[in-house]
Image (cartoon, rainbow, N blue to C red):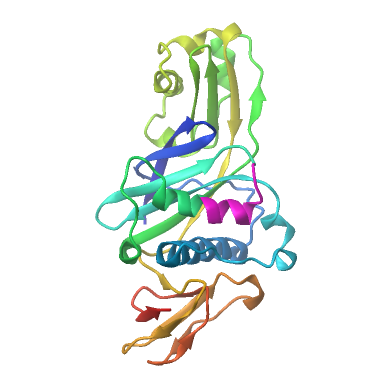
Amino acid sequence: MKKTACILTIITGLVLASCTKGGEPVHNDSPYTARQQAYLLNLARATLISYLKNKSKPEVDVSALPDELKVKRGCFVTLTKRGYGLRGCIGYILPVEPLYEGIINRAIAAATQDPRFPRVSLKELDDIQIEISILTLPEEITFSSPEELLDKLEPGRDGVVLKTPYGSSTYLPQVWEQLPDKELFLSSLCAKHGAPQNTWKQSGTISVSTYQAIVFHEPEFGRKGTGTLGGIAGPHGAAIIGSANWQKGEITEKTVQPGEEIEPLTICTPNSDIALK
Protein backbone atom coordinates (compact mmCIF):
# COMPACT_ATOMS: atom_id res chain seq x y z
CA MET A 1 0.00 0.00 0.00
CA LYS A 2 1.32 3.42 -0.89
CA LYS A 3 1.52 5.93 1.88
CA THR A 4 1.48 9.69 2.21
CA ALA A 5 4.49 11.88 1.62
CA CYS A 6 4.31 14.94 3.82
CA ILE A 7 5.21 18.59 3.43
CA LEU A 8 5.53 20.48 6.70
CA THR A 9 4.90 24.04 7.75
CA ILE A 10 6.20 25.38 11.06
CA ILE A 11 3.69 27.42 13.08
CA THR A 12 5.04 28.53 16.49
CA GLY A 13 6.88 25.25 16.85
CA LEU A 14 3.86 23.17 15.83
CA VAL A 15 4.10 21.45 12.49
CA LEU A 16 1.35 20.94 9.95
CA ALA A 17 1.80 18.50 7.07
CA SER A 18 0.29 18.63 3.60
CA CYS A 19 0.43 15.16 2.10
CA THR A 20 0.32 13.56 -1.31
CA LYS A 21 0.51 9.89 -2.23
CA GLY A 22 3.99 8.49 -2.48
CA GLY A 23 6.29 5.76 -1.27
CA GLU A 24 7.02 5.03 2.35
CA PRO A 25 10.47 6.05 3.53
CA VAL A 26 11.81 4.33 6.60
CA HIS A 27 14.95 5.22 8.51
CA ASN A 28 17.08 2.07 8.21
CA ASP A 29 18.50 2.36 11.71
CA SER A 30 15.16 2.28 13.54
CA PRO A 31 15.63 1.66 17.26
CA TYR A 32 12.00 0.58 17.63
CA THR A 33 10.95 -3.07 17.65
CA ALA A 34 7.84 -4.30 15.87
CA ARG A 35 6.08 -4.52 19.22
CA GLN A 36 7.01 -0.96 20.13
CA GLN A 37 5.75 0.34 16.79
CA ALA A 38 2.50 -1.61 17.15
CA TYR A 39 2.06 -0.27 20.67
CA LEU A 40 2.48 3.36 19.57
CA LEU A 41 -0.05 2.88 16.77
CA ASN A 42 -2.47 1.24 19.21
CA LEU A 43 -1.90 4.09 21.65
CA ALA A 44 -2.69 6.65 18.97
CA ARG A 45 -5.94 4.90 17.99
CA ALA A 46 -7.07 4.29 21.57
CA THR A 47 -6.34 7.96 22.26
CA LEU A 48 -8.52 9.09 19.38
CA ILE A 49 -11.37 6.83 20.47
CA SER A 50 -11.12 8.03 24.07
CA TYR A 51 -10.80 11.70 23.28
CA LEU A 52 -13.49 11.84 20.60
CA LYS A 53 -15.87 9.82 22.80
CA ASN A 54 -15.47 11.53 26.17
CA LYS A 55 -12.49 13.92 26.05
CA SER A 56 -10.29 11.52 28.05
CA LYS A 57 -6.72 10.36 27.44
CA PRO A 58 -5.26 6.90 28.14
CA GLU A 59 -3.35 6.60 31.40
CA VAL A 60 0.08 5.14 30.74
CA ASP A 61 2.07 3.24 33.34
CA VAL A 62 5.35 4.92 32.51
CA SER A 63 7.35 2.61 34.77
CA ALA A 64 6.43 -0.36 32.57
CA LEU A 65 7.46 1.22 29.27
CA PRO A 66 10.82 0.52 27.65
CA ASP A 67 13.23 3.44 27.73
CA GLU A 68 12.97 3.99 23.96
CA LEU A 69 9.35 5.10 24.37
CA LYS A 70 10.13 7.50 27.21
CA VAL A 71 12.90 9.47 25.52
CA LYS A 72 11.93 12.89 24.21
CA ARG A 73 11.62 12.75 20.41
CA GLY A 74 10.19 14.91 17.67
CA CYS A 75 7.21 13.15 16.11
CA PHE A 76 3.99 13.68 14.26
CA VAL A 77 0.81 11.76 13.56
CA THR A 78 -0.85 11.62 10.14
CA LEU A 79 -4.49 10.66 9.63
CA THR A 80 -5.52 9.47 6.16
CA LYS A 81 -9.17 8.87 5.26
CA ARG A 82 -10.24 6.12 2.90
CA GLY A 83 -11.30 7.57 -0.45
CA TYR A 84 -10.46 11.12 0.69
CA GLY A 85 -6.78 11.49 1.48
CA LEU A 86 -5.14 13.58 4.18
CA ARG A 87 -7.48 14.22 7.11
CA GLY A 88 -5.03 15.76 9.58
CA CYS A 89 -1.31 15.85 10.29
CA ILE A 90 0.44 17.65 13.13
CA GLY A 91 3.69 17.21 15.02
CA TYR A 92 6.86 18.74 16.42
CA ILE A 93 10.27 18.53 14.81
CA LEU A 94 12.16 19.14 18.04
CA PRO A 95 11.95 16.76 21.03
CA VAL A 96 9.64 18.57 23.44
CA GLU A 97 8.06 15.65 25.33
CA PRO A 98 8.48 11.88 25.90
CA LEU A 99 7.64 9.90 22.78
CA TYR A 100 4.60 8.08 24.20
CA GLU A 101 3.18 11.39 25.42
CA GLY A 102 3.94 13.07 22.11
CA ILE A 103 2.00 10.38 20.24
CA ILE A 104 -1.02 10.90 22.49
CA ASN A 105 -0.98 14.68 22.10
CA ARG A 106 -0.17 14.71 18.39
CA ALA A 107 -2.96 12.23 17.65
CA ILE A 108 -5.46 14.51 19.36
CA ALA A 109 -4.04 17.56 17.60
CA ALA A 110 -4.16 15.90 14.18
CA ALA A 111 -7.83 15.04 14.70
CA THR A 112 -9.01 18.26 16.32
CA GLN A 113 -6.55 21.12 15.76
CA ASP A 114 -5.46 20.98 12.12
CA PRO A 115 -6.87 24.32 10.87
CA ARG A 116 -7.26 23.01 7.32
CA PHE A 117 -9.94 20.49 8.26
CA PRO A 118 -13.04 20.15 10.44
CA ARG A 119 -12.66 18.00 13.53
CA VAL A 120 -12.58 14.28 12.95
CA SER A 121 -15.73 12.59 14.28
CA LEU A 122 -15.80 9.36 16.28
CA LYS A 123 -17.71 7.61 13.51
CA GLU A 124 -15.14 8.80 10.98
CA LEU A 125 -12.47 6.67 12.64
CA ASP A 126 -14.02 3.71 10.79
CA ASP A 127 -12.34 5.09 7.64
CA ILE A 128 -9.11 6.42 9.14
CA GLN A 129 -5.60 4.97 8.91
CA ILE A 130 -2.92 6.21 11.33
CA GLU A 131 0.71 6.83 10.44
CA ILE A 132 3.47 7.80 12.87
CA SER A 133 6.77 9.48 12.03
CA ILE A 134 9.52 9.78 14.63
CA LEU A 135 12.29 12.23 13.84
CA THR A 136 15.97 12.16 14.64
CA LEU A 137 17.39 15.32 16.17
CA PRO A 138 18.11 17.95 13.49
CA GLU A 139 21.81 18.60 12.95
CA GLU A 140 23.14 21.77 11.34
CA ILE A 141 25.38 21.16 8.36
CA THR A 142 28.29 23.40 7.41
CA PHE A 143 28.92 24.58 3.87
CA SER A 144 30.69 27.50 2.18
CA SER A 145 29.00 27.47 -1.21
CA PRO A 146 25.69 26.44 -2.85
CA GLU A 147 27.52 23.60 -4.55
CA GLU A 148 28.80 22.23 -1.25
CA LEU A 149 25.30 22.46 0.24
CA LEU A 150 23.84 20.48 -2.64
CA ASP A 151 26.57 17.88 -2.31
CA LYS A 152 25.78 17.31 1.37
CA LEU A 153 22.05 16.67 0.93
CA GLU A 154 20.87 13.08 0.50
CA PRO A 155 17.51 12.87 -1.31
CA GLY A 156 15.05 10.40 0.13
CA ARG A 157 16.81 10.30 3.48
CA ASP A 158 17.24 13.88 4.71
CA GLY A 159 14.50 16.02 6.08
CA VAL A 160 15.62 19.64 5.72
CA VAL A 161 15.09 22.72 7.88
CA LEU A 162 16.02 25.91 6.02
CA LYS A 163 16.37 29.22 7.88
CA THR A 164 16.77 32.47 5.93
CA PRO A 165 16.38 36.16 6.82
CA TYR A 166 12.73 35.74 5.75
CA GLY A 167 11.88 32.93 8.17
CA SER A 168 12.14 29.15 8.20
CA SER A 169 10.45 26.07 6.77
CA THR A 170 11.00 22.35 6.56
CA TYR A 171 10.31 19.36 4.35
CA LEU A 172 10.23 15.79 5.55
CA PRO A 173 12.36 13.18 3.74
CA GLN A 174 9.19 11.99 1.97
CA VAL A 175 9.00 15.22 -0.02
CA TRP A 176 11.98 14.22 -2.16
CA GLU A 177 9.56 11.96 -4.02
CA GLN A 178 7.73 15.01 -5.35
CA LEU A 179 10.85 17.21 -5.62
CA PRO A 180 13.78 14.90 -6.46
CA ASP A 181 15.96 17.67 -7.91
CA LYS A 182 18.04 19.25 -5.13
CA GLU A 183 17.90 22.79 -6.52
CA LEU A 184 14.14 22.65 -7.01
CA PHE A 185 13.77 21.16 -3.53
CA LEU A 186 15.61 24.07 -1.90
CA SER A 187 13.94 26.67 -4.09
CA SER A 188 10.55 25.35 -3.07
CA LEU A 189 11.61 25.34 0.56
CA CYS A 190 12.53 29.04 0.24
CA ALA A 191 9.21 29.91 -1.37
CA LYS A 192 7.39 28.02 1.36
CA HIS A 193 8.20 30.70 3.95
CA GLY A 194 8.08 33.65 1.56
CA ALA A 195 11.75 33.94 0.61
CA PRO A 196 12.89 34.48 -2.99
CA GLN A 197 13.51 31.08 -4.51
CA ASN A 198 17.26 31.62 -4.95
CA THR A 199 17.83 32.62 -1.31
CA TRP A 200 19.31 29.20 -0.57
CA LYS A 201 22.28 30.15 -2.74
CA GLN A 202 23.25 32.94 -0.34
CA SER A 203 25.46 30.76 1.84
CA GLY A 204 26.43 33.42 4.36
CA THR A 205 22.88 34.36 5.30
CA ILE A 206 21.18 30.99 5.71
CA SER A 207 21.45 27.90 7.89
CA VAL A 208 20.44 24.34 7.02
CA SER A 209 19.79 21.40 9.32
CA THR A 210 18.92 17.85 8.37
CA TYR A 211 17.14 15.01 10.15
CA GLN A 212 15.70 11.61 9.28
CA ALA A 213 12.27 10.05 9.84
CA ILE A 214 11.26 6.64 11.13
CA VAL A 215 7.86 5.98 9.55
CA PHE A 216 5.32 3.24 10.24
CA HIS A 217 1.55 2.90 9.89
CA GLU A 218 -1.46 0.71 10.53
CA PRO A 219 -1.73 -1.93 7.80
CA GLU A 220 -5.38 -1.15 7.08
CA PHE A 221 -8.04 1.53 7.42
CA GLY A 222 -10.62 1.63 10.17
CA ARG A 223 -9.33 -0.51 13.00
CA LYS A 224 -11.87 -0.60 15.80
CA GLY A 225 -11.14 -0.30 19.49
CA THR A 226 -12.21 0.78 22.94
CA GLY A 227 -11.31 3.91 24.83
CA THR A 228 -10.60 4.43 28.49
CA LEU A 229 -13.99 3.00 29.56
CA GLY A 230 -13.92 -0.22 27.57
CA GLY A 231 -16.76 -1.66 25.52
CA ILE A 232 -19.02 -4.59 24.72
CA ALA A 233 -18.97 -6.83 21.66
CA GLY A 234 -22.03 -6.27 19.49
CA PRO A 235 -24.20 -8.88 17.74
CA HIS A 236 -21.47 -9.70 15.22
CA GLY A 237 -18.69 -10.13 17.76
CA ALA A 238 -15.14 -8.76 17.65
CA ALA A 239 -11.57 -9.90 17.07
CA ILE A 240 -8.87 -8.48 19.35
CA ILE A 241 -5.51 -7.83 17.69
CA GLY A 242 -3.73 -5.47 20.07
CA SER A 243 -3.75 -3.21 23.09
CA ALA A 244 -2.62 0.26 24.12
CA ASN A 245 -1.65 -1.23 27.48
CA TRP A 246 2.04 -2.16 27.31
CA GLN A 247 1.67 -4.67 30.16
CA LYS A 248 -0.65 -6.81 28.02
CA GLY A 249 2.33 -7.79 25.90
CA GLU A 250 2.00 -9.10 22.36
CA ILE A 251 -1.55 -10.18 21.64
CA THR A 252 -2.52 -12.90 19.20
CA GLU A 253 -5.93 -12.55 17.59
CA LYS A 254 -8.69 -13.45 20.02
CA THR A 255 -12.40 -13.72 19.20
CA VAL A 256 -14.88 -11.98 21.50
CA GLN A 257 -18.44 -13.30 21.44
CA PRO A 258 -21.51 -11.00 21.28
CA GLY A 259 -22.28 -9.43 24.63
CA GLU A 260 -18.82 -10.04 26.09
CA GLU A 261 -16.93 -7.24 27.81
CA ILE A 262 -13.92 -5.77 26.00
CA GLU A 263 -11.24 -4.23 28.17
CA PRO A 264 -10.27 -0.55 27.91
CA LEU A 265 -7.65 0.42 25.31
CA THR A 266 -8.20 -2.74 23.25
CA ILE A 267 -7.64 -2.70 19.48
CA CYS A 268 -9.73 -4.92 17.16
CA THR A 269 -10.02 -5.74 13.48
CA PRO A 270 -11.86 -3.28 11.23
CA ASN A 271 -14.88 -5.58 10.85
CA SER A 272 -15.36 -5.96 14.62
CA ASP A 273 -18.66 -4.95 16.17
CA ILE A 274 -18.08 -2.83 19.28
CA ALA A 275 -20.37 -0.75 21.47
CA LEU A 276 -18.33 1.76 23.46
CA LYS A 277 -19.01 2.51 27.10
Q: Main secondary structure of the magenta part?
A: helix
Can residue 97 be found in the magenta stretch? yes
Q: Quadrant of the C terminus?
A: bottom left
**Where on the picture, by quarter, is residue 145?**
top right
Q: Nearer the viewer, residue 152 or 35?
A: 35
Asked whether, in this view, residue 122 is left or right of residue 217, the answer is left
Q: What percent of the width, then of the height, locates residue 33?
A: 63, 61
Which residue is rendered at x = 49% and y = 31% of the image?
10
Give the magenta range: 96-105
Q: What percent of the width, then of the height, locates residue 176?
A: 44, 33
Asked whether, in this view, residue 119 is left or right of residue 151, the answer is left
Which residue is rendered at x = 51% and y = 37% of the image?
14
Asked whether, in this view, residue 265 is left or right of residue 115, the answer is right
Q: Nearer the viewer, residue 263 or 30?
A: 263
Which residue is rendered at x = 44% and y = 88% of the image?
255
Q: What percent of the width, then of the height, locates residue 242?
A: 52, 74
**Where on the picture, by quarter, is residue 104?**
bottom right
Above-or-below relation of 228 to 203: below
**Where on the picture, by quarter, is residue 163?**
top right
